[in-house]
Image (cartoon, rainbow, N blue to C red):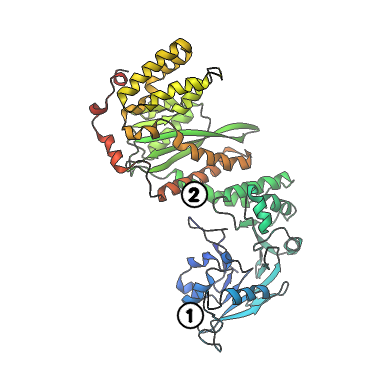
């Protein structure tokens, strides 16, 4: 018996498909959007469809599938389901209002679709295979299925929450080779999970901790975009409950290895097809185990603005941001993949980063993030004076052109030298770094004088990683962060709106003399 996964997601988008499994060539278990992956020849070969329940994500491909094979079959397709499910389909789907009634098409004597009622515990034998409905617990009448072939059995839970009868069957099935169990929501959505009678890691982990360690467990029906959250949460919670291996010994590793491949492919993709005049660098910090210690690790993200004005996630890494070798290796990896045409790098003044930029991006300018710089400033003034000092410094960035920016900068330094000489000194030392944006088109200033464009990205990484808490190792942290960043990259790639217009990006091609700033040139 061969089981092919056509769809196993709790939603759609980014090539995700809802629940559907193909058993050999002739049996379909649920009929979600995954069925649409089959070609017409494969659809014609399906003789039996077994449904767990009548929710749309499990049946939505059934009507068009039937329509597609209407004139290509000589015998009917048998639809197997419990009586309550068949009643819903007959009354609400195949009712001539939503879809034609294939139970009387082409004729009542020779219909395309016939109904076969199944019952919990009663096996349906098709050739050498047995398919037995088993108990499940959902908001509507539902079953799971025990699939038995010549080489062993597979259990599919269908949509369910904790149900002792299902697990008793799983534990007692001596030839069980695989358990496919749903886990629809992450823990932060437990209220929804409980209300809709779905598993989340907190509820599934207790059942998994008492399950057989010899049977691989496969998670299905996970909420799109939250898959990695769910996988990590389940594994951590099972281990916390006393299990040695988490999700049945090896399945986390197997699932994660697939994700690792996706992340690695994205991180290693070539960048030589475009130039990237602007590169933003920033980091957010998470906890991970390194050896026997829990340490703070930085997720470093590089985002570039391409010559056509579009944003891309260029790369990411996990490591110690205070280390110059780390930064140098990271930036060189970007160049090795073809990153070129960099005119301005925007970042905070991390220890080691500046030297790395000078080494790797010779000839490029560096813009010190004004937001981070302001934080450094405010750390050196009394809290009561902070708002005033911040307001004064912000006037520098409110000017309409380069000449006025520099005039106001010197005026601010003069004002603060009397009341806050230390801050005035910090400004003078950082002048070239915080005013580097002036070398570039004024229409770009607000978007290149800080790393704020990465703020949303960092917040999403932090939101996802906070759910996990402490990662078992840096690789696990990189995996989850990479998954988040791929999603962000795809979102930018699919958006109609560019970060900068193509017209404004052409302003970068003006001659250096036209934008030269004497003070910066002299430096």
Mark 1, other Cα within 10 Å: few <14 / some 14–19 / many ≥20: some
Q: Which mark is residue 283?
A: none
Residue hosting label 1: 70
Task: Report whether 511 appears left or right of 25.
Answer: left
Image spot of residue 364 (x, y percent): 34, 29
The tag earlier along the polypeptide, 2 or 1, is: 1
Count every numbered label the image shows and give the total.
2
Judged from this view, the residue extending furthest toward the top is 418
Residue on which the image places disc 2: 262
In front of the other: 282 or 421 = 421
Q: Is residue 398 above or below residue 163?
A: above
Q: Residues within 10 Å of mark 2 (few under 14, many from 20)?
A: some
Residue at horizontal 46%, vertical 47%? 265
Residue at mark 2 to residue at mark 1: CA–CA distance: 39 Å
Is residue 82 visible in the rendered image? The answer is: no
Position of the N terminus by quadrant: bottom right
When asked about the image quadrant of residue 281, the answer is: top left
- Secondary structure of the residue carrying numbered label 2: helix
* Closer-to-camera residue (167/433): 433
Which residue: 67% across, 45% down? 236
Q: Residue at x 48, y 80 (%)?
A: 70
Residue at 65% across, 53% down: 192
Front in this rendered view, residue 335 or 136: 136
Relative horizontal placement of residue 72, taking residue 210 as reference (left or right): left
Q: Position of residue 261 (x, y in %)?
A: 50, 49
Camera-nearest label, 2 or 1: 1
* Viewport quadrant of the C terminus: top left
Residue 419 in sight in this render: yes
């Amino acid at each position: 018996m061969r089981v092919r996964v056509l769809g196993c997601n709790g939603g759609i988008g980014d090539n995700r498909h809802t629940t559907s499994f193909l058993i050999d060539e002739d049996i379909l278990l649920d009929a979600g959007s995954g069925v649409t992956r089959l070609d017409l020849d494969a659809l014609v070969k399906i003789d039996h469809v077994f449904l767990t329940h009548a929710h749309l994500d499990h049946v939505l491909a059934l009507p068009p599938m039937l329509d597609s094979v209407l004139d290509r079959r000589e015998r009917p397709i048998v639809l197997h389901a419990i009586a309550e499910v068949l009643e819903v389909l007959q009354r609400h789907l195949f009712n001539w209002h939503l879809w034609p009634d294939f139970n009387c098409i082409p004729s009542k004597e020779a219909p395309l679709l016939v109904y076969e009622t199944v019952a919990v515990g009663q096996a349906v034998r098709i050739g050498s295979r047995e398919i037995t409905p088993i108990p499940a617990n959902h908001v509507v009448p539902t079953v799971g299925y025990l699939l038995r072939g010549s080489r062993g059995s597979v259990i599919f839970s269908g949509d369910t929450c904790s149900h002792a009868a299902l697990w008793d069957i799983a534990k007692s099935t001596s030839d069980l080779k695989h358990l496919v169990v749903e886990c629809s929501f992450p823990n932060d959505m437990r209220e929804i999970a409980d209300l809709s009678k779905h598993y989340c890691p907190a509820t599934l982990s207790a059942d998994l901790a008492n399950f057989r360690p010899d049977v691989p467990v496969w998670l299905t029906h996970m909420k799109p975009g939250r898959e990695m959250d769910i996988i990590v949460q389940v594994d951590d919670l099972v281990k916390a409950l006393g299990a040695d291996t988490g999700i049945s010994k090896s399945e986390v590793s197997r699932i994660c290895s697939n994700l690792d491949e996706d992340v690695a492919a994205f991180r290693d993709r070539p960048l030589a097809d475009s130039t990237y005049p602007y590169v933003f660098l920033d980091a957010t910090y998470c906890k991970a185990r390194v050896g026997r210690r829990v340490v703070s690790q930085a997720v470093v993200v590089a985002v570039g603005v391409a010559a056509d004005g579009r944003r891309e996630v260029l790369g990411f890494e996990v490591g110690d941001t205070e280390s110059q070798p780390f930064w140098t290796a990271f930036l060189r990896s970007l160049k090795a993949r073809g990153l070129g045409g960099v005119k301005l790098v925007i970042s905070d003044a991390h220890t080691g980063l500046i030297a790395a930029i000078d080494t790797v991006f010779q000839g490029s300018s560096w813009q010190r993030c004004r937001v981070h710089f302001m934080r450094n400033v405010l750390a050196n003034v009394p809290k009561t004076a902070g708002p005033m000092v911040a307001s004064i410094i912000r006037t520098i960035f409110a000017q309409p052109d380069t000449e006025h920016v520099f005039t106001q900068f010197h005026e601010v330094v003069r004002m603060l030298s009397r009341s806050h000489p230390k801050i005035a000194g910090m400004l003078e030392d950082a002048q070239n770094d915080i005013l580097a944006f002036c070398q570039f088109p004024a229409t770009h200033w607000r978007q290149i004088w800080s790393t704020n464009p990465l703020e949303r990205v960092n917040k999403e990484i932090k939101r996802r990683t906070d759910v996990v808490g402490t990662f078992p190792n840096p690789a696990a942290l990189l995996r989850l962060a990479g998954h988040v960043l791929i999603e962000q990259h795809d979102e930018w790639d699919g958006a109609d709106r560019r970060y900068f217009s193509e017209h404004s990006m052409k302003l970068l091609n003006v001659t250096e003399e036209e934008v030269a700033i004497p003070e910066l040139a002299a430096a």
